[in-house]
Amino acid sequence: AQKVTQAQTEISVVEKEDVTLDCVYETRDTTYYLFWYKQPPSGELVFLIRRNSFDEQNEISGRYSWNFQKSTSSFNFTITASQVVDSAVYFCALSEPGIKAAGNKLTFGGGTRVLVKP
Amino acid sequence: DGGITQSPKYLFRKEGQNVTLSCEQNLNHDAMYWYRQDPGQGLRLIYYSQIVNDFQKGDIAEGYSVSREKKESFPLTVTSAQKNPTAFYLCASSTPRTGGKEKLFFGSGTQLSVL
């Protein structure tokens, strides 16, 4: 069975501090995708990034960066110089590949609430 | 603007009552999904549909039912058999599955509470 663990339930920082969110996953599959989604107070989840299991190149996109380490089954996410608008719940998710008809089912972690104070 | 519309935003259910949550998308996506979110927990899949007139149970389908008569619509009915229906319900859609890489587009959710 697949599992995604986000050990941090809530992180509180002051604006301009960096925030790193941890994500650890379990899967028996060799080919899979990992995602990060953001859920602002309005409720809808917004896609942030997708990584496949063969691409361990870490990436920086503006104030966001990701650290994917297959050896430790971790896919961590960092917000640099946080802003109040970054306050949200962040979810890590793992795809379920395999049978074509199985659908794009995602296994989500429990989420990490980030509160950025002015 | 293309997107997913969920209604109502808040819904109250009386004991023994069935209620239906609406989900409409104009993204021309074939696949649609219903997730349940409980406070402090991640999302859990209730039902999903890859194509019109076909749908599959997710991890927590008991007490729920769905239909997919039109590509753009995927309503969820919470039946009286669901004993703990209070939760935030999210509808999502995606392009057809090609190896698990599709990102999901989400609606803004419906908060269901029991009176």
Image (spheres, grey):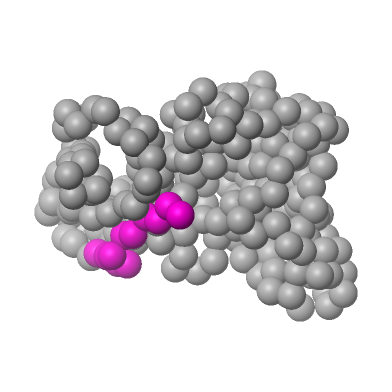
Question: Residue A32: where, in percent of width, then height?
Answer: 38, 35
Q: Residue at x 37, y 46 (%)?
A: A28
Q: Relative to residue B77, is residue A88 drawn left or right?
A: left
Q: Relative to residue A7, is residue B21 drawn left or right?
A: right
Question: Residue A50: where, in percent of width, then height?
Answer: 35, 33
Q: Is residue A50 visible?
A: no
Residue A69 appears in which quarter of the rendering?
A: top left
Quadrant of image for the C terminus of chain B: bottom right
**Magenta stretch: residue B46 in it?**
no
User: Which one is nearer the viewer's eye here, A100 or B44?
Assistant: A100
Q: Residue at x 18, y 49 (%)?
A: A72
Q: Relative to residue B93, is residue A112 drawn left or right?
A: left
Quadrant of image for the N terminus of chain B: top right
Asked if B57 appears above or below B71 in the picture, the reply is below
User: Which one is nearer the viewer's eye here, A61 or A15?
Assistant: A61
Asked if A18 appears above or below B40 in the picture, the reply is above
User: Number of labelled discs?
Assistant: 0
Give, as a single range, the part of the protein colored magenta.
A1-11
Q: Can residue B67 be seen in this view?
A: yes
Q: Which residue is drawn at 23% across and 65% down?
A: A12
Question: Residue B62: where, in percent of width, then height?
Answer: 73, 62
Q: Relative to residue A49, is residue A47 drawn left or right?
A: right
Question: Residue A5: where, in percent of width, then height?
Answer: 33, 59
Q: Which residue is drawn at 36% across and 33% down?
A: A31
